[in-house]
Amino acid sequence: MKTLKPIILSLALIMLSCGDNEKKEQHSDTAEIPVSREMIAELTSPPNVPTPVGRRKAKKLIVNMEILEEEGELTDGVKYVYWTFGGSVPGSFIRTRVGDEVEFTLSNHPDNKLPHNIDLHAVSGPGGGAESSFVAPGHEKTFSFKTLNPGLYVYHCATAPVGMHIANGMYGLILVEPEGGLPQVDKEYYIMQGDFYTKGKNGERGLQPFDMQKAVDENADYVVFNGSVGALTGDNAITAKVGETVRLYVGNGGPNLVSSFHVIGEIFDKVHVEGGDLINENVQTTLIPAGGAAIVEFKVDVPGTFILVDHSIFRAFNKGALGMLKVEGEEQKKIYSGEIREGIYLPEGPGIQNMPTTNEIVESEIPAKSFEEQMEFGKQIYMQTCFACHQAEGQGIPNAFPPLAKSDYLNADVDRAIGVVINGLSGEITVNGAKYNSVMTKQMISSDDVANVLTYVYNSWGNSKKVVTKKMVDDVKKK
Ligand code: HEC
Ligand SMILES: [Cu+2]
């Protein structure tokens, strides 16, 4: 070991110095790009991006960014005071080309409570601009930098406590396009992941202050795209048409967590790894470091809803890191058939049988004899069947599965609730003021079991204490 060390060290030094030279060369090239005229930068809030630079010449690009501290909603009923660049989380998207001379003015709104600054990873200079941009409420600071390296870069506030400023939403992306611009695509979107730490646990209502200890422990209550749960779902989904090419500028503000970015049902044709020049092809999931970015590109081949997730999957389904890309257009059966047939699989039986069209349901062996038994049997069914979606305490999952606990929808109409369980439900419904637009498949359980499980649900978690009988279920079935 001892003899090897100096060799490894000198090798590393040689490699380092080589890298340095190459980098310097590139710098001196792009540093010499002349700028002609001035131009005010178009800034956009997520998920939108400004118009591509195309073939335009390098310019003096004026960026005016305003810092706003304002209350917003992290998820239904959960308020949070965000600190923002430009009024959104992530902050305004800045689009430049290599060789631009960016004149950056950072203004701190007089109503704000704290000083802030900005560190742009696209800047070659001390603190990425942080030292020159430190600005108190009611003031503004201007500094200027030349974009030397093309790529997709994160910017963030770097005022102490840095982690807290980032955790409150102070991050965004700046794109430096190469000479001649990036290749044209049909749709471009801006998505950035961030982790949030609140005093109350996930879903606890009211105004939630930032929790420093949880942040230090990296114990996030929310992991979200574009600043809040649902910022990219339902009506907020991003869209495309079959056959279009889509480019996503994906950043990760952190402050702590690394993202395993994945789009369910899509393969990235190209990934600009870490937002740089390296292009990887045919990628399923790409890693986006905290304080890093990636450009992902793919063609949408078939219609449907494609779910964007952090594939550290509890973050997606339990903490909010879930978005949607809705693709419209003609079915492409050659590429994706949809379900062709459903069979019953019996490992030790005669092989595949056809699904009985009558949907035979096995009757419970022993009907419940008392309310207590109904509750007991009902709970069993609940924990076997409903629990996976509606959760152990009936609390549901925001934007995905409606709550059964204190559900106004449930409590308003017993026959309707019976109908939901035996026939399934799809389309938009509103439960306790929140909209859901999803699908619950019909539950293949006997009338007794429907009666028991609904009795259990109605007599739990603050619901209206109705008792549902087998006869009530059968009456709904007859209708
Ligand atoms: C695979 C997930 C899933 C399972 C399992 C499931 N549900 Fe649902 N449930 C949903 C979804 C999704 C909706 C909302 C459908 C929509 O948006 O139209 C829903 C809606 C409901 C509603 C009406 C809305 C409300 O919150 O009051 C009731 C009642 C309900 N489910 C009861 C049950 C019961 C009882 C069971 C078990 C027997 C069950 N569900 C099993 C996903 C599921
Ligand atoms: Cu700040």
Image (spheres, rainbow, N blue to C red):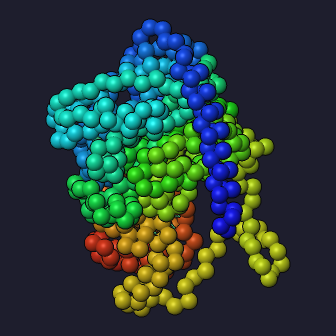
Q: Up-down: is 337 above or below 424? A: above
**Residue at left 43%, top 81%?**
379
Q: Position of residue 353 (x, y in %)?
A: 78, 71
Q: Report whether residue 395 is seen.
A: yes
**Residue at left 57%, top 82%?**
363
Res 102 quadrant in image = top left
Q: Up-down: is 141 above or below 413? A: above
Question: Foreground: 32 or 403?
Answer: 32
Q: Is residue 56 left or right of residue 463?
A: right
Could you tell me which quadrant the N terminus lies in?
A: bottom right
Residue furthest toward the top?
A: 37
Q: Position of residue 52 (x, y in %)?
A: 54, 22
Res 354 quadrant in image = bottom right
Q: Is residue 321 left or right of residue 357?
A: left
Q: Position of residue 167 (x, y in %)?
A: 34, 50
- Please tell me in which quarter of the rendered image ligand 2 is found: top left
Question: Foreground: 353 or 196?
Answer: 196
Q: Report whether residue 45 is seen.
A: no
Question: Foreground: 389 or 159?
Answer: 159
Total number of numbered discs in the rendering: 0
**Residue at left 21%, top 32%?**
109
Q: Up-down: is 242 above or below 103? A: below
Q: Position of residue 170 (x, y in %)?
A: 34, 42
Residue furthest toward the right?
A: 350
Q: Up-down: is 11 above or below 26? A: below
**Residue at left 56%, top 54%?**
260
